[in-house]
Amino acid sequence: MSKIYATGKRKTAVAKVWLKPGSGKILINGIGLDEWLGGHDSIKMKVMQPLVITKQDKSVDITAVTLGGGYSAQADALRSGIAKALNLFDREAFRKDLKVAGLLTRDARVVERKKYGKRKARRSPQFSKR
């Protein structure tokens, strides 16, 4: 089977994910998962969640390119992209488990834009009575 491509998004981060049968190697931006995320074990678990749920952590290779946002948003985008790619890989076997875990739904929350006359999106300047 050839490579399967999927895109994951979260806030302003985008992850382009290629999935193919293999031995469980994960390369993100040309480096391994442990090197890419350093000591953030909870975020690593979040990235691995779709693979663990579908029991594919040792049987597929993942190559990904992430851009935009911070490392946490990039990790969430990567998780979304991996889940979408696994869904395309074997729809009948994985879709139900991924759907129940909420991994096929895009998190649409983004930062609200700043409005004129305000200091931030909703924060008003300090009011002075005198």
Image (cartoon, rainbow, N blue to C red):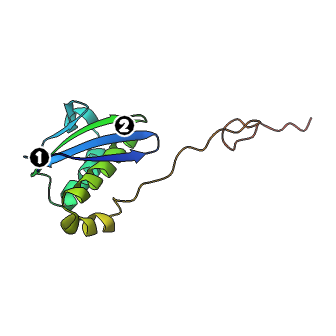
- Which mark's residue is nearer the viewer, 1 or 2? 1
Residue closest to the eye, 9 or 45: 9
Question: Residue 6, percent across and down?
Answer: 29, 48
Quadrant (top left, top right, bottom left, bottom right) of the C terminus: top right
Q: Which residue is mark 1?
A: 24
Q: Which residue is situated farthest in the top direction here?
A: 30
Residue 82 in the image, given as x and y percentages of width and height: 26, 50
- 46 lies left or right of 10: left
Across and down, in percent, residue 23 comes to: 7, 46
3D distance between C-alphas at marks 1 and 2: 22 Å
The residue located at (17%, 45%) in the rendering is 3
User: At 70% across and 35% down in the image, what residue appears?
Assistant: 119
Residue 57 x/y as whole percent: 14, 52
Q: Secondary structure at mark 2?
A: helix
Label 2 packing within 10 angstroms: few (<14), some (14-19), many (20+): some
Residue 7 badge:
none
Q: Residue furthest front?
A: 2
Instruction: Tell me which amino acid carries mark 2.
Output: Tyr
Which residue is outermost to the left? 23
Name the residue nearer the viewer: 5 or 105.
5
Q: Are marks 1 and 2 in contact (CB under 8 Å)?
A: no
Question: Quick one: SS at disc 1?
Answer: loop
Q: Amino acid at mark 1?
A: Gly
How busy is the neighbourhood of tag 1: few (under 14 within 10 Å), some, or many (20 plus)?
some
Q: How many marks?
A: 2
Q: Which residue reaches farthest right?
A: 130
Q: Is residue 38 visible?
A: no
Asked where in the image residue 88 lies, by quadrant, the reply is bottom left
Q: Mark 1 or mark 2, which has the lower sequence index?
A: 1
Residue 11 in view here: yes
Foreground: 112 or 87? 87
Q: Which residue is mark 2?
A: 71
